[in-house]
Amino acid sequence: MRYQTFGRHTGLRVSEYVLGTANFGSAPAAAGPEGARAIFEQFVAAGGTTIDTSNLYQDGEAETILGKLMGRERDDYVVITKYTGSRSAQIGPGTTGNSRKTMFRSLEESLRRLGTDYVDVFMPHFPDGVTPLPEILAGLEDLVRAGKIRYGGLSNFPAWRIADAAVRSELSGRMSLVGIQTEYSLAERSAERELLPMAEAHGLGVALYSPLAGGLLTGKYRHGERGRLSARPAAHVIAGEDGAQRTAVLDAVLAVADETGTGPIQVALAWLRRRAACAGTSMIPVLGPRTPAHLAGYLDALNVELSPHHYQLLDEVSAIRFGAPYEDVAAALAHGTDGDRGLLDEPLVPVI
């Protein structure tokens, strides 16, 4: 497994895959403690060093299991954890959200469960709709100064808020915002409109979760297998294929897998790795295996390289509309406002 820095503002080295721990727990649908151990050891043996978790995963059990697995080798790993919500049966005012109070309390609880005195990257899991951004940044900065976190980031925030945070962080000269988390896959490329260009412009690392679209891109739902998408309504719709384009994307993935003699998982991750390689900042997939066999399939993708024809096919079938203002500006520059000539020598296209 190869390594890169997490964005352009830090020397923090991360592995090209991040191990997601959402399935590290004893719930019926989770991996179980022994399954989590097998997955963790397999990931480490393959050279993986970077692990993503959250206070929400398995109601905190994921952090507890991860802490025991890292043990005395904790410093060998890059740990990303998050806060904001709670799965507690007793949620009261002031116990959730992104305020300084919740941030500090949640981190202390995460440190206790992880059995460590610091985490490498700490992020709000999602916006709470009320906490001002300066409060979040000031809290993260205080935690960096206290030595309890090394870096701060933002998960699931809109691009305009992240850009605001990045500028504030850069101008303060005290704490660099180093990265973000967002969903991204062949079946969900919305991040290309704003989030990924913004991250590249500000030098932020990007952790990409749901790289297989909740299992849709594995093709398993077409064979009657169940997964987290199976609980969605409308039983007459194959899980996750809630639109013609998603069906076309999965058709293309399965066709490329058949032509190349590999599997749909390897095709989807090979496409994602190529997109990451072409980006101007680090983009690393967060993989959430439930079994060692799942992880083995993900690791196999590290050795898969598709042909230019296949990459083009996947690009085209999964392409999204950029909408206004991107398409309007591109059309105006390409054809002129009078429809006769362009305004520039070369047409302007959206930067992805």
Image: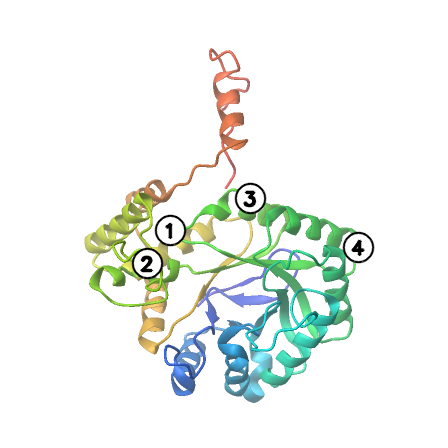
Closer to the camera in the image, 254 or 108: 108
- In the displayed structure, 287 sits above or below 283; it is below
Mark in front: 4 vs 1:
1
> Is the residue marked by circle 4 packed among few (<14), some (14-19), or many (20+) residues within 10 Å?
few
Q: Name the residue beneath numbered marker 1.
A: 187
- In the displayed structure, 232 sits above or below 67; it is above
Give me the residue at 70% from left, 70% from top: 94
Residue 320, quarter of the rendered image: top left
Mark in front: 2 vs 4:
2
Asked if the residue at tag 2 contacts the one at tag 3, i.e. Cβ–Cβ closer than 8 Å, the answer is no
Amino acid type shown at disc 2: Leu
Label 4 and label 3: CA atoms lie apart by: 24 Å
Give me the residue at 38% from left, 58% from top: 213
- In the displayed structure, 314 sits above or below 334; it is below
Amino acid type shown at disc 4: Ser
Q: Name the residue beneath numbered marker 2.
A: 216
Q: Which mark is residue 194?
A: 3
